Structures are given as C-alpha cells and as structure tokens.
C-alpha cells in the first residue's frame, strides 16, 4: 500500500493564506509539461503551468490518462481557490497513480484495505 | 466519512468466474444512462450499458463529470476483463462521488483520515 501524499494534519485547515503555496510565488517554467504533452502553446494564463513543471512530464501524463486534461482544468477552475489548487492536483495525481497500479479498484482499494 | 462500496474481503480475489457478475447474465435496458446523458444511440455492443442502467442517470453523470465518458470507456476496454468491470465502474463512481463532495482532496482525503 502506498502512503498518501499529504500529512493528515494539513487536511482540516481549508483557510487560504498568502503563502508559498500560492502559484504567483512559484517560478513557472514554460512550456509546462501539460502543454508539452498536449503539443499546444503554453500561454501566460495557463492554469496547469504552476502544477505541472516541464521536468516531470509523467505527473501530467498519468493524471491526463485517468481524468483527461479538460476535466482537470474544469475541476480546478470554477470551484477551487488558487491556494488549494496545488493540493487538488496532488490528490488527483495520487488517485491517477492508484488507478494506474490497480485499474479495477484504484484508490478505493486502498480505502478498503485501511478499513479492514 | 463514507464507507467504501466494497466488502474488504472481496478485494484480494481477482479470479474471473462465470458468475452472476458477468454482464451477459444481467438484463440490459436500453438506452443506458450513459447514452441518454450523452444523447447518442445505445448500440448492442455499448460497453457502458451493463453498468449504467437508465433508472440511475446520476451515477453516470457524476462519473462522467470527473473522469469523462471516453476515459471511462478507455479504462474499461483494453485492460479490465469483463468480470471485473462492474467493480471498476463502482470504484470509479465512488471516487467521483468523493471528488464531488471534496473537490480538493477527494478520495485521498478519506485515505489521510484513515491513516491518522
């Protein structure tokens, strides 16, 4: 079983701080991995660029294979404030990895094992 | 926290039996919920029909919103034997429900809580 990518203590706090997690303070290298994989121009406002750096194309490829890039963008854009988007992407990548390892049960398999 | 849709004891056994889980023994009502939602003709070979009955359109809508129908089909078709597809769909629907309830952490949030 793989451990989750979050420290459990970080979960209950959903307050948005102007912290180092805010994408504006992160150095964004373009084109991002998403635009590289999708072979499109990485624009200034690319919503995926802060979370998919070009040196880790596998991170995007796995998430894209399970959720699809348009769904990732849709899930990030309207409802998740910027300060929580890095965590949202990490949890999607974690779930996509679980689904790739176990195409039948994915993350649900891990939950079943933990509930035993 | 929501309990998972599987009995943990069912997880380790991945043998395919000619059992009542095989879609061929399930009565398939057409058009299925997937084809109804996507407004397309539900063909005889529709891979989604056995798992998305027309009386439960929300099941498909939620899975479609998170994974996308083409990704659900792609994930089912090449690698998962027919006898495991019902479980694969159930786990995807479970994960999609978790992501809808908690757009930041989804299922990963449940895993973090359980690992505490």
Image (tube, coloured by chain):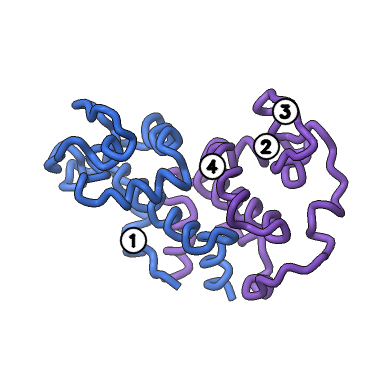
Chain colours: A blue, B purple
Which one is in front in this view, the residue at disc 2 or the one at disc 3?
3
Badge 2: chain ID? B
Which one is in front in this view, the residue at disc 4 or the one at disc 1?
4
State the residue at coordinates (76%, 35%).
B32
Dot 3: element: helix
**Residue B71: image tag:** 4
Circles 2, 4 touching at the beta carbon (< 8 Å): no
Disc nearer the start of the sequence (2/3): 3
Residue on which disc 1 sits:
A6
Rendering quarter of residue A103: bottom right
Disc nearer the start of the sequence (2/4): 2
Number of other residues with Cα within 10 Å of mark 4, as a class: few under 14, some 14 to 19, many 20 or more: some
Badge 3: chain ID? B
Circles 2, 1 touching at the beta carbon (< 8 Å): no
Residue B90 x, y percent position in the rendering? 65, 53
State the residue at coordinates (20%, 36%).
A31
**Residue B58: image tag:** 2
Q: Are marks 2 and 1 on the same chain?
A: no
């Amino acid at each position: 079983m793989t451990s989750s990518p979050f420290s459990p203590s970080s979960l209950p706090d959903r307050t948005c701080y102007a912290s180092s997690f805010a994408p504006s303070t992160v150095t964004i290298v373009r084109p991002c991995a998403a635009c590289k994989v999708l072979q499109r121009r990485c624009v200034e406002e690319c919503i995926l660029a802060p979370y998919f750096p070009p040196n880790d194309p596998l991170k995007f490829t796995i998430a894209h294979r399970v959720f699809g890039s348009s769904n990732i963008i849709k899930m990030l854009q309207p409802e998740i404030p910027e300060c929580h988007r890095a965590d949202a992407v990490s949890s999607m990548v974690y779930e996509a990895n679980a689904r790739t390892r176990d195409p039948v049960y994915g993350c649900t398999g891990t939950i079943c094992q933990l509930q035993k």
